[in-house]
Image (spheres, coloured by chain):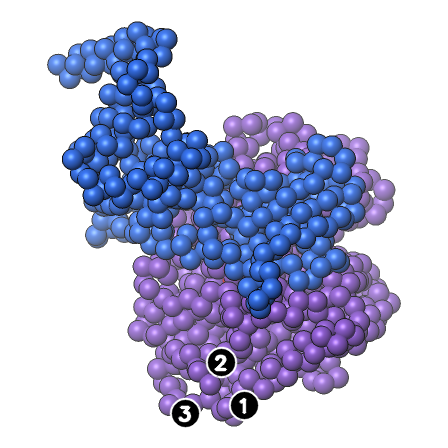
Chain colours: A blue, B purple
């Protein structure tokens, strides 16, 4: 079949000339091929100057993350026919977002890797350990295996909206990695890890739960769900102090009152209404989120009414409280 | 000239390289890794099925060693196979304690699955992402130890002065400026060469670089004619369907729905060793009992739950790349080029005959796999012999540290090559694009140096590779930039591939017998009297010069092999 690709180019060595442009390619390829195969075909037979990363072509090495048709994707796992619905439809290929571009589709992942370093990315076992292997349940290991399935492609980081406005956010992949250690029965530093993840700037409380990382992840790591589990564990462990916990309370308050998230109020409520410096520092981000339609400002207007079914929501809250009381008495 | 300098340099950051680096660091050496891919992108991550060790009380390392030697068709050095099997358990336990999430039994101990050619279920695994799970844990240890990693540095050659290895030349892909990297000991750990074939289960980066680099520097390559064809690779892409699929109970069927392996290996059936299964499949296909040039791998009877837990990755791969959901239908598979038994000759400490040069992992040949490797033994080899090479390299570096700087001319040869490539492209003349030569090479290797071989086929292959070498002299580069020039890397890798292919063809043409994965139609029997010996290939301007060396036999005299 004929495939049309529009590829964003970036030439770091362009002197004076235009560093960024688009190249169009039309290639003739078998039906079953992936976007990566198509790019390799271009590189091999049409334009040898096109640069991109690749290796395994089987969705395991994490080299080939790109933005395709506006969304982060692993190109060796995306078939051309997944995207092309009508004959002659063009596929737009760009480098991943939230990272500087080195050349064409190759991004600088330094930031990605440095975020990993922030979560003490190795097991911290009890000392001394057992003589042979640790005796742990099969289920515990299976759980780990799903988070460990992360191939560090960077696609979730590319598309995470928080990172667009706050570079300090540890971001989905590294937080999922953190979860992998918190969730490991062999790790002896669970509480310390949770404390750190909760207190640190850009930690678990900064995710806006937009679900983007879950949607784009090619390996079903579900980073957002991991972050939510970390929040829960942090609260349970009693280490969710400061911004985080306040954020949680504000969250509950908002849902109870309005039946929805009041993002405009959430921010002042979580950092503290009188914490002017922090509030100011968040302003540019908040404004950009507003512009991008990520902050539903009209929800915050004082005359906004609660949602229609607010009664039910409140009833749910009452019931949860009752049950909790009963359970603890 | 700025020179980077460390005690021990490890070239390649797959499992073998990282395990070597960890051990060298533990032994007090200042270690650095030079790698063309980020460590976590290494092809070790693609290993699916598992890693072997005799852990069960009823199993024994001796039984593991025997299975390995038998699997090798008696070409393995038995002292090395014994070390591999004996040191396996401790190394696996260590991996577990570093954090590897091995699948468990009810009692919490590591679970094991049966694998081809093994007399006991001794393959430890993490679903079907064993390689990735171990690779990530080993990399975590590299971070913990703070080992220096020169990432996306493509190594082009070894620096040898007065017969001693003293460093490497590398091309940092970010800048494109060739750089000398000095080290008192160098450990080559660059992995496999599968890309010499088309199709193959190997990653696009598996181009045999380290083998060719060592070969060009005077080190002999051993047993290069032995290439493993994995019985279950996908039709179009060559992507692997793990042996674990059969280990868990999957069937191989021909077009009549017959479990044909019952004819070829009545005892082990689908779990005979890989050379046996691949030959059987090819025979079925050649005799008209295949489907679309393939046979069928059927795991439906295992049920969705087990498939998701144990074979989840290959379910996804078959869906994505072959449009088949293995829960509901059998998937078409065929034998595909998979693993290089041959490599840089080393002793059991990873030392090559070139002083200062060590090697470990798939690019090395100790030799534990002989003429045919057992599944689950090569991940084990990377760990056991990576560790040994790292330790020996650290010791060597301590004893042989030299204050003498590298000579000013170390970059000359590589620089000359790069400039001639660039100039040719600027002038606009030049011959084939690398993909054309690579395509013809892969096809030729597949047909003439594949599962079944013959003198005529190999002779024509020899002629062809010489022709391709000549055409390579005027290969055409299109990207003339410095920054991240993937076109240049591809062209350079192709040079390595041609050298490697040449040694494989020469070795295969000379070896007039059938042993393990090397099957000559014109010499169908194993011939211990004349050929129970290792092939050693040395680089000369006319192509490889072959010599032969003895095989170490300790406990097991060669016998006829049946499964
Ligand atoms: C699909 C597949 C599945 C497999 N499954 C199993 C299994 O289940 N069990 C088992 O035991 N074995 C398995 N194997 C085999 C096993 O995975 C490999 O033999 C082993 O992982 C090789 O490890 P390595 O460290 O030697 O090389 P690799 O992991 O390939 O690492 C090579 C390293 O060298 C670097 N490098 C290469 N060239 C250069 C250069 N010029 N300059 C700088 N750096 C360079 C690369 O960047 C990389 O870091 C499988 C193989 C494949 C292909
Ligand atoms: S859910 Fe959270 S971590 Fe994931 S993309 Fe959205 S903001 Fe980022
Ligand atoms: S979590 Fe998913 S998307 Fe993010 S880096 Fe890992 S594999 Fe890629
Ligand atoms: S090429 Fe390895 S993940 Fe796509």
Mark 1 and mark 2 lie on one chain; the one further toward the N terminus is: 2
Side of B472 relative to B69 (left or right): right
Percent from the top left, x then y, of residue B134? 44, 52
**How many numbered marks does the figure carry?**
3
- Labels 3 and 1: the sequence-earlier one: 3
Q: To which quarter of the image does residue A16 belong?
A: bottom right
User: Is B395 or A9 nearer to us in this picture?
Assistant: A9
* Rendered location of residue B532, percent (x, y): 66, 71
- Spatial separation of the CA atoms under disc 3 and disc 1: 14 Å
Chain letter for mark 3: B
Q: Secondary structure at mark 1?
A: helix
Counting from the top left corner in percent of width and height, residue B26 is at 32, 68
Name the residue that disc number 1 marks. Answer: B409
Q: Which residue is mark 3?
A: B404
**On the same chain: label 3 and label 1?**
yes
Residue occupying the point 55% across, 64% down: A12
Give the chain of mark 1. B
Judging depth in this view, the residue of A62 and A42 nearest the camera is A42
The reply to whether residue B97 is in sight is: no
A162 vs B391, nearest the viewer: A162
Of mark 2 and mark 3, the one earlier in the sequence is: 2
Q: Give the distance between the C-alpha atoms of the residues marked 2 and 3, in whole angstroms.
A: 14 Å
Residue B88 falls in image quadrant? bottom left
């Amino acid at each position: 079949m004929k495939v049309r690709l529009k590829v964003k180019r970036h030439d770091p060595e362009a002197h004076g000339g235009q560093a960024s442009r688009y190249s169009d390619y039309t290639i003739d390829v078998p039906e079953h091929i992936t976007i990566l195969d198509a790019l390799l075909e271009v590189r091999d037979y049409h334009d040898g100057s096109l640069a991109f990363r690749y290796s395994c072509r089987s969705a395991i090495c994490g080299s080939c993350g790109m933005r395709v048709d506006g969304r982060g994707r692993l190109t060796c796992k995306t078939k051309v026919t997944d995207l092309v619905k009508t004959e002659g439809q063009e596929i737009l290929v760009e480098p991943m977002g939230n990272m500087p571009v080195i050349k064409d589709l190759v991004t600088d992942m330094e930031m990605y890797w440095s975020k990993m370093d922030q979560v003490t990315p190795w097991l911290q076992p009890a000392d001394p350990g057992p003589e042979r292997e640790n005796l742990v349940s099969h289920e515990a290991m299976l759980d780990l295996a799903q988070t460990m399935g992360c191939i560090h492609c960077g696609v979730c980081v590319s598309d995470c909206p928080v990172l667009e406005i706050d570079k300090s956010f540890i971001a989905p992949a590294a937080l999922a990695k953190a979860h992998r250690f918190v969730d490991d029965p062999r790790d002896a530093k669970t509480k310390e890890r949770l404390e750190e993840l909760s207190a640190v700037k850009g930690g678990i409380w900064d995710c806006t739960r937009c679900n983007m990382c879950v949607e784009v992840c090619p390996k079903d790591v579900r980073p957002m769900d991991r972050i939510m589990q970390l929040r829960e564990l942090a609260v349970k462990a009693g280490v969710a102090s400061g911004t985080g916990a306040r954020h949680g309370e504000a969250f509950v308050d908002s849902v109870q009152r309005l039946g929805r998230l009041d993002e405009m109020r959430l921010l002042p409520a979580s950092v503290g209404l009188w914490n002017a410096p922090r509030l100011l520092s968040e302003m540019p981000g908040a404004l950009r989120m507003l512009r991008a339609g990520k902050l539903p400002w009209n929800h915050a207007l004082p005359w906004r009414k609660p949602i229609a079914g607010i009664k039910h929501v409140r009833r749910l809250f009452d019931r949860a409280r009752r049950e909790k009381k009963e359970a603890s008495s | 000239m700025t020179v980077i300098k460390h005690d021990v340099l490890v070239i390649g950051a797959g499992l073998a390289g990282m395990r070597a680096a960890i051990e060298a660091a533990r032994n007090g050496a200042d270690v650095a890794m030079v790698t063309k891919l980020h460590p976590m992108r290494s092809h070790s991550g693609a290993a699916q099925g598992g890693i072997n060790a005799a852990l069960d009380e009823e199993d024994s390392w001796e039984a593991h060693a025997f299975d390995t030697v038998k699997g090798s068709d008696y070409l393995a050095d038995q002292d090395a196979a014994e070390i591999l099997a004996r040191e396996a358990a401790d190394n696996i336990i260590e991996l577990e304690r570093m954090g590897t999430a091995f699948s468990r039994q009810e009692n919490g101990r590591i679970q094991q699955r049966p694998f081809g050619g093994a007399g006991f279920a001794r393959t430890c695994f993490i679903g079907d992402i064993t390689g990735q799970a171990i690779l990530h844990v080993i990399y975590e240890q590299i971070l913990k130890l703070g080992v220096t990693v020169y990432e996306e540095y493509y190594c082009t050659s070894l620096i040898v002065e007065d017969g001693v290895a003293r460093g490497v030349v590398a091309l940092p892909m970010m800048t494109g400026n060739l750089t000398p990297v000095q080290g008192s000991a160098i450990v080559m750990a660059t992995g496999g060469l599968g890309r010499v074939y088309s199709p193959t289960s190997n990653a696009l980066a598996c181009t045999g670089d380290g083998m060719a680099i060592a070969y060009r520097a005077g080190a002999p390559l051993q047993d290069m004619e032995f290439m493993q064809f994995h019985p279950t690779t996908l039709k179009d892409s060559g992507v692997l369907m793990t042996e674990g699929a059969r280990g868990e109970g999957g069937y191989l069927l021909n077009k009549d729905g017959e479990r044909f392996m019952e004819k070829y290996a009545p005892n082990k059936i689908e779990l005979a060793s890989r050379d046996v299964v691949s030959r059987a499949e090819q025979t079925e296909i050649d005799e008209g009992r295949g489907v679309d040039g393939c046979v069928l791998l059927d795991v439906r009877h295992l049920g969705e739950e087990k498939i998701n837990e144990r074979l989840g990755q290959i379910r996804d791969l078959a869906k994505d790349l072959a449009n088949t959901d293995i829960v509901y239908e059998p998937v078409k598979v065929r034998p595909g080029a998979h693993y290089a038994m041959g490599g840089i000759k080393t002793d059991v400490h990873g030392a090559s005959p070139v002083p200062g040069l060590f090697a470990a992992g798939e690019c090395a040949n100790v030799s534990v796999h002989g003429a045919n490797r057992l599944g689950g033994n090569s991940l084990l080899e990377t760990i056991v012999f990576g560790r040994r090479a790292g330790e020996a390299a650290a010791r060597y570096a301590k004893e042989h540290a030299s204050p003498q700087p590298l000579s000013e001319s170390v970059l000359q040869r590589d620089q000359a090559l790069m400039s001639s490539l660039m100039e040719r492209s600027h002038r606009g003349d030049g011959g084939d694009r690398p993909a054309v030569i690579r395509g013809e090479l892969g096809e030729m290797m597949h047909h003439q140096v594949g599962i079944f071989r013959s003198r005529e086929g190999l002779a024509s292959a020899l002629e062809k590779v010489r022709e391709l070498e000549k055409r390579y002299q005027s290969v055409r580069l299109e990207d003339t930039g410095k920054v991240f020039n993937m076109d240049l890397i591809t062209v350079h890798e192709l040079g390595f591939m041609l050298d490697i292919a040449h040694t494989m063809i020469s070795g295969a043409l000379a070896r007039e017998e059938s042993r393990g994965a090397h099957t000559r139609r014109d010499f169908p029997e194993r011939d211990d009297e004349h050929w129970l010996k290792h092939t050693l290939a040395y680089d000369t301007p006319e192509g490889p010069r072959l010599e032969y060396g003895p095989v170490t036999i300790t406990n097991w005299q060669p016998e006829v092999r049946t499964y």
